[in-house]
Image (tube, rainbow, N blue to C red):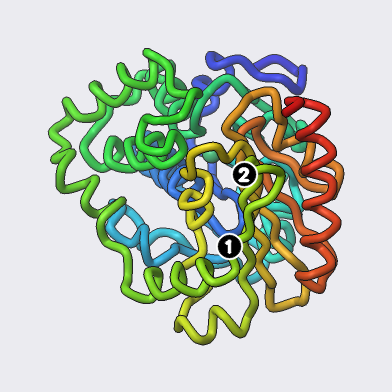
Amino acid sequence: MSLIASLSLADLAALLRGAPRRCVVTSHVRPDGDAIGSALALALALQKLGHPVVVLNEDGLPDALRFLPGGERVTRPSGAVDADIVFALDNATQPRLGDGVNAAIAGVPMLVNVDHHLSNTRYGHHHYIDSASPATGQIVAEWLEAAEVPLDAAIAENLYTAISTDTGSFQYSNTTPATYRWAARLIETGLDVGELNRKIYQSSPLRRVKLLGELLQVLDISADGRVASWFLTAEMAGRAGALPGDSEDMIDHIRGIDGVVVAAFFEELPDGKVRLSVRSKDARFDASALCGRFGGGGHRMAAGARLAGPVGEARQRVLSSIHEALIAAIPA
Ligand SMILES: [Mn+2]
């Protein structure tokens, strides 16, 4: 393998085909379908090739992803892990792995960063970043192909979930012909695509719909209908009986409004900070750059940041910044 930090797909494949190594596979805090799906697919492949593997996530496996094959392998960090190599997937900055995970892997001699976030900081000893890829799951699919690891139904179900969720079910503009070709190859392993989509998209707990009711009460439309935002306080979450993670993807409801160009979601966190999510529907408005002003990042069309509270003040600061950037990027 080359000594340069930036790896090729062939370098990545060589890491899988080499002598057994004790591996850790990890991904970002508050994991989504791409974070968990790509981590489990890689873990299942590593195991097939004879590498002992541990899957770590700071926040563990979300309830909504319990159906994924191998999901029981996802563990929360508890103390240092003894391993030879860490694969960090779908994770733009090292702190976003979480404090527990970073403590657990601190003594591991090699960290390999594989991701598709535009804002990836190239942390780790080696990295492979493809910001044109719509999902880390698609990168893992290409990686396993390069390593000649045969796809099986368990790996395919994880990769399909990763790719489907990060492309908004093959809707977003990052979806390419290659994405559909991968979907076809994954389905060809015998996936029941109707059943799998039901598990991914039609298994929402009732409390999520109640949470939507709370959010609708505070829906705010500004900039002549081009900006939609709402916020969630701990009190509102309590009324809905919502659990951490239930707010995931709620922003899609306001992004979906006709005429809206930018959607923003502000969520009060237990530590008093505010989690900001931003979605853009026009590539001229760069959500990643906007969130970068507040110490965050992500993709051009989908990004996030963490701000100091309280929610009301964070909202004012961010919305005025969005209005300013929107007028500059897309004059009305
Ligand atoms: Mn992703």
Q: Secondary structure at mark 2?
A: loop
- Identify which amino acid the numbered label 1 is placed on: Leu
Horizontal and vertical percent position of residue 255: 52, 45
Question: Left or right: where does residue 35 sit relative to residue 270?
Answer: left
- Observer-side mark, 1 or 2, equals 2
Front-most of residues 164 and 79: 164
What's the residue at 64%, 66% (across, down)? 231
Q: Secondary structure at mark 1?
A: loop
- Identify which amino acid the numbered label 2 is placed on: Gly
Q: Are marks 1 and 2 in contact (CB under 8 Å)?
A: no
Horizontal and vertical percent position of residue 64: 36, 62
| Mark 1 or 2, nearer chain start | 1
- Residue 217, above or below 114: below
Marking on residue 72: none
User: Within 8 Å: ligand 1 and the Cβ of disc 1?
Assistant: no
What's the residue at 82%, 60% (across, down)? 316
- Residue 272, above or below 192: below
What's the residue at 84%, 45% (across, down)? 321
What's the residue at 55%, 23% (across, down)? 12
Question: Left or right: where does residue 288 sit relative to residue 53?
Answer: right
Front-most of residues 236 and 66: 236
Question: Left or right: where does residue 270 sit relative to residue 121?
Answer: left
- Residue 6, above or below 307: above
Q: Which residue is mark 2?
A: 225
Residue 54 appears in the figure: no
Taking the image in four quarters, ligand 1 sits in the one at top right
**What separation in Å lies between label 1 and label 2 (alpha carbons)?**
12 Å
User: Within 8 Å: ligand 1 and the Cβ of disc 2?
Assistant: no
Classify mark 1: residues with Cα within 10 Å, few (<14), some (14-19) or many (20+): few
Q: Which residue is mark 1?
A: 219
Front-most of residues 300 and 141: 300
